[in-house]
Image (tube, rainbow, N blue to C red):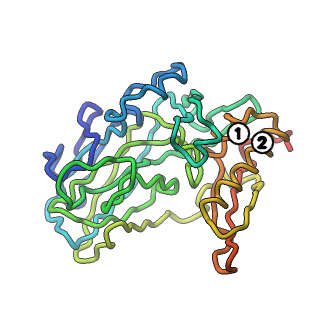
Amino acid sequence: MEHAIDRQTFHTTWDRSLPPAVEIEPGDVVHFETEEVSGGQVTPGCSASVLAAMDMDRLYPLGGPVYVKGAEPGDALEVEMLELHPGPWGWAGLIPGLGLLPDDFPDPYIRHFDLSDGRFATLREDIRIPIQPFCGTMGVATDEPGAHPVLPPTRGAGNIDTRHLTVGARLYLPVLVPGALFSAGDCHAAQGDGEVCVTGIECPMSFSLRFRLIKGHSPAPYRYSFRTPPGPLQPRSDAAGYFATTALGPDLMENARAAVRDLINWLNQDHRLSREDAYILCSLAADLKISQIVDQPNWGVSAYLSLAVFEPDQP
């Protein structure tokens, strides 16, 4: 059976007391429509000043909750990604106080993207980011009472920003309350692993998910797993190879910051991007990876930038 949740049916906190938007049987499909992450505060072409004055209580409008009949604590909820269709526009920005490098970039900054091509979002005439959509937030209600913010992930997953949850992937979540009370939103047209400036390409999206139950096989709270479809994870990102910067040291967070700073510097010097645009490109098309975590006391973090974003005549 199929169900629908439109963009006027949403909530902005996790709360186990919220009434379900729909009740479904295992195996059913739900079609969602959601607004971009600001809940309509960011509009096409708006100035960056909007980012410094946002009402934080309006962020993360999530479609749901979906009550899955028969779901009980201790079960796993399987969520299969069937369709993901970004809207015609999106944005990425630097929000004061947020992101991996808030002290380096204290001022608001925004870039708007035309997504109507369906294949690429253009940062500059010679820099095009492959559109690879996914839901940044997917999760279930926590078993703790009261309202809980969406920004940090919770016991029921939530704001996981896992870019490989594209069409064909299956996500496995712990069921913490009867019915699971699943919700989703915060959709991205593209994002790198790490989402270092705190935004992907934020966009409205319509998407379809199928739900199944796996009785008695719940992941632990604050855990989730997923299965990707066969083939390369992101073929359009892999096509031209990567340029990577690596930082070594005893603190993984400081290493991540140093690797991203070096990548920003490379983009600024070699590709003449402003530092703000370079930081945004790192968030949209670069992947943070732990290169090694065993050669104590200095661990390695690398920032891999997909060279597929550059037109073929660019180095």
Is 119 placed above or below 27 here?
above
Residue 139: percent from left, percent from top: 32, 55
> Label 1: how many residues lie within 10 Å, few (<14), some (14-19) or many (20+)?
many
Residue at 64%, 47% in the rendered image:
285
Circle 1: residue type: Ala
Callout 1 touching callout 2 (CB < 8 Å): yes
Residue 278: percent from left, percent from top: 70, 39
The part of the image, by quadrant, that contains residue 223 is bottom left
* Side of 289 relative to 195 (left or right): right
Circle 2: residue type: Leu
> Label 2: how many residues lie within 10 Å, few (<14), some (14-19) or many (20+)?
many
Q: Residue furthest front?
A: 103
Residue at 69%, 80% in the rendered image:
295
Counting every numbered tag in the picture gives 2
Q: Secondary structure at mark 2?
A: helix
Q: Secondary structure at mark 1?
A: helix
Is 204 placed above or below 84 here?
above
How far separated are the C-alphas under marks 1 and 2?
Answer: 6 Å
Is 60 placed above or below 222 here?
above
| Residue that mark 2 sits on | 267
| Residue that mark 1 sits on | 278
